[in-house]
């Protein structure tokens, strides 16, 4: 397996090197609000790509692959999954990573200016898919939530595409509406309406966690795009009040909050607080160094969704505090590095590219923070996976495409800084 992975990475590096060869000249940005580019071309020296970022992403993917296998190996013993083999989820996860890898490789070939032009259309496509998933006999429901569209061999989750689409759309919108400081409400209202429509569609599934991530992405790009602190905190206050009302007006959401506040009570221990209580038991069993890979007891039908939402709990049980801190450290480094690439792009007068990269950093960092908080009992259960690690084909696919776009932004930054043209 290790030799196969080494050959795969060598092939990936070779393809990226050929994609970034000096013979492929791209047009250079001349300036302007939206990001115009010249039509003249000039050869540029190969400057490569951010290899440390690729290695950290690969480490998270491979560790996630091992943990998905560990967390799901005993699932066929459950009558609900009796038709599955012990490697069922492992092989599906491997296939998802392989498809996502190919998609990411193709996404890297696409210039940033093409993503800028396609942003509104991709947003419209995501809206259509969010509507389609709600249509009976098309959208697939699991545990009372209708979030997936069955495509035969795989199930696609439109909310994952919506995160990426909103990110691109918001970045493009902020570049086009640079007068946001002077005419704030007039400039921001269309984007707020677009995000609200996405939110309503997600709440209809329901997927409040996905809506929360999208709202934070949009808010982050709004702030980075030039909104002053007073207006930013006003919008943040409005969102907080809106989410509070969503919880207050929904009985089952209120029950989740009560279960989070007291998961050990007789009322909640076997109900809404069941997952949280067993997640805490798993992490408590791990102590400092864990019980060893494969030694988790909680994954043996005690902890539901151990291979998806609660993968970190299994990591905590098998690798202990050391393993959890390592995961946190990797995500902190990943987020910091992506944000740095975004700031670099903004410094080079590539505003759209900078906002997209920083938006991806906010997305990965915030979703990882929420998932970790849920697993550690610091936040209520939200139904969000751990990016790049948890089982889920749609999430892995869109996450790797987003990382590939960041790598493309970094590559174009390097070309500009060394006198080349993009």
Image (tube, grey):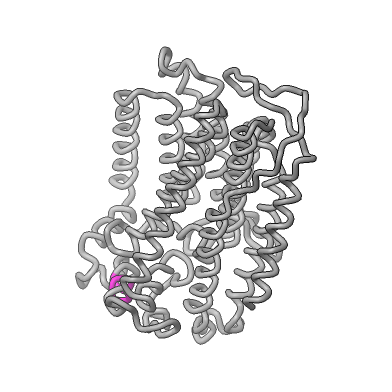
Q: Where 208 falls versus 3 (above or below)?
A: above
* Magenta run includes residue 281: yes
For residue 314, side relative to residue 400 (left or right): left
User: Where in the figure is residue 56, as x and y percent of width and height?
Assistant: 51, 59
Estimate the x, y position of residue 248 in percent, counting from the top left. Answer: 28, 46
On screen, residue 3 above or below 125: below
User: Residue at image x 72%, y 62%?
Assistant: 11
In the shown orientation, is residue 275 left or right of residue 386? left
Magenta segment, prevailing SS (helix, strand or loop): helix
Depth check, front residue: 5 or 148? 5
Residue 134 visible in image: no
Find the magenta span and give its range.
277-282
Q: Quadrant of the N terminus?
A: bottom right
Q: In the image, what residue occupies the spot 43% across and 13% down?
A: 183
Comparing 79 with 175, the one in front is 175
Residue at (30, 64) in percent of width and height: 376
Q: Position of residue 103 (x, y in %)?
A: 69, 53
Whether the magenta-drawn stretch holds residue 173 is answered as no
Decide: is 169 above or below 378.
Answer: above
Q: For the point 34% across and 29% down, which residue is it?
A: 235
């Amino acid at each position: 397996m290790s030799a196969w992975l080494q050959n795969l990475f060598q092939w990936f590096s070779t393809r990226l090197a050929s994609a970034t060869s000096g013979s492929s000249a791209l047009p250079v940005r001349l300036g302007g609000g939206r990001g115009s580019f010249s039509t003249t071309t000039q050869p540029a020296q190969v400057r490569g790509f951010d290899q440390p970022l690729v290695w950290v992403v690969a480490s998270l993917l491979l560790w996630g692959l091992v943990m998905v296998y560990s967390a799901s190996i005993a699932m066929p013993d459950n009558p609900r999954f009796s038709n599955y083999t012990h490697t069922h989820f492992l092989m599906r996860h491997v296939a998802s990573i392989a498809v996502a890898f190919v998609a990411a490789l193709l996404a890297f070939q696409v210039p940033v200016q093409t993503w800028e032009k396609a942003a509104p259309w991709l947003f419209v496509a995501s809206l259509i898919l969010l509507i389609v998933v709600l249509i009976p006999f098309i959208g697939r429901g699991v545990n009372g939530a209708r979030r997936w569209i069955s495509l035969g061999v795989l199930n696609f989750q439109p909310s994952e595409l919506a995160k990426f689409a909103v990110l691109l759309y918001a970045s493009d919108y902020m570049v086009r509406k640079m007068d946001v400081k002077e005419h704030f409400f007039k400039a921001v209202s269309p984007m707020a309406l677009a995000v609200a429509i996405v939110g309503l569609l997600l709440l209809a599934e329901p997927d409040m966690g996905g809506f929360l991530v999208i709202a934070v992405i949009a808010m982050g790009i709004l702030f980075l795009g030039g909104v002053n602190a007073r207006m930013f905190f006003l919008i943040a206050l409005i969102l907080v009040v809106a989410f509070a009302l969503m919880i207050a007006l929904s009985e089952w959401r209120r029950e989740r909050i009560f279960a989070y506040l007291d998961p050990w009570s007789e009322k909640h221990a076997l109900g809404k607080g069941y997952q949280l209580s067993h997640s805490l038991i798993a992490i408590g069993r791990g102590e400092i160094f864990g019980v060893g890979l494969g030694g988790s007891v909680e994954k043996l039908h005690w902890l539901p969704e151990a291979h998806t939402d609660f993968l970190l709990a299994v990591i905590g049980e098998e690798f202990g505090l050391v393993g959890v801190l390592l995961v946190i450290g990797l995500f902190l480094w990943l987020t910091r590095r992506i944000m740095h690439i975004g700031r670099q792009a903004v410094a080079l007068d590539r505003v759209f590219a900078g906002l997209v990269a920083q938006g991806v950093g906010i997305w990965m960092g915030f979703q990882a923070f929420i998932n970790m908080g849920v697993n550690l009992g610091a936040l209520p259960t939200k139904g969000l996976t751990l990016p790049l690690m948890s089982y889920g084909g749609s999430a892995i696919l869109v996450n790797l495409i987003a990382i590939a776009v960041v790598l493309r932004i970094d590559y174009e930054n390097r070309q500009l800084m060394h006198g080349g043209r993009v």
